[in-house]
Image: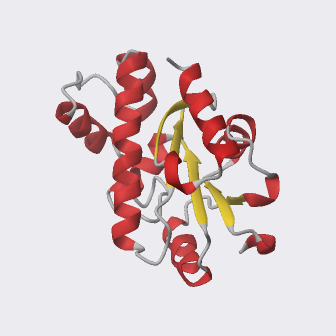
Amino acid sequence: MTNGEEELVLVPGHIGNRAALQHLQVRPEQIVDVSNEWGFILARLTSRKPKRLLLVGHPGKLAKLANGDWQTHSSQTASPLPLLKELCRELQLPAGDGQNTVEELFMSFLDEDQRRLLAERTASAIRSRIAADFPGLPEPTVVLINLAGEVLGSSGHGENWPAAVRAASLRAEKDIE
């Protein structure tokens, strides 16, 4: 593991890093900046057997994982917006056609409760896809944030993290209610 850490926090960049430190009370040495190389990092971690994984990031990046897009650079993968609109339809949320970005969908088109529902469903889809494609890993906890680093919603915090981190995650979720 990174510096011998067995509980790792995977982030795509500085927004996820900052949100993890602020909302989830993790230590900086637990954080791994994955950038766009999710497949490479997750495959490497399969052989290292971490005890717990936490993913923190924006749904514009992390929702690509639910599609099995493990290299998430925008030039290498399609937008996750069609997936998110499909999840909106499944949840019976409005899925208008006027959004060009994931941020527009979450922050301009949906109200707070709808954002939380969509974020929780998206986080759950990410968890399921990682579990299916990387069966040697513990099922991760996924926390989705907006571009300001505020928690939109999460999935999986219950069994995968110690009580202090679970409580911080739950407090962060209540902050948006």
Residue sitting at x 45%, y 42% = 60
* Horizontal side, residue 9 vs residue 120: left or right: right
- Most foreground residue, 65 or 91: 91
- Most foreground residue, 46 or 101: 46
Asked if one can make out residue 150 in the rendered structure from this viewpoint, the answer is no
Task: Name the spot of residue 34 as percent of width and height, x first.
Answer: 62, 61
Looking at the figure, which quarter contains the N terminus?
bottom right
**With respect to residue 72, does 174 lie above or below?**
above
* Horizontal side, residue 115 vs residue 38: left or right: left
Task: Name the spot of residue 121 as percent of width and height, x first.
Answer: 34, 40
Task: Name the spot of residue 22 as percent of width and height, x first.
Answer: 74, 35
> How is this picture coloured?
secondary structure
Count how many numbered circles sit on residues in the image. Answer: 0
* Horizontal side, residue 85 vs residue 21: left or right: left
Asked if one can make out residue 90 in the rendered structure from this viewpoint, the answer is yes
Residue sitting at x 45%, y 21% = 107
**With respect to residue 124, does 153 lie above or below?**
above
In terms of image quadrants, where is residue 169?
top right
**With respect to residue 73, does 105 lie above or below?**
above
Q: Residue furthest front?
A: 163
Residue sitting at x 61%, y 69% = 51
In terms of image quadrants, where is residue 99?
top left
Residue sitting at x 63%, y 32% = 149
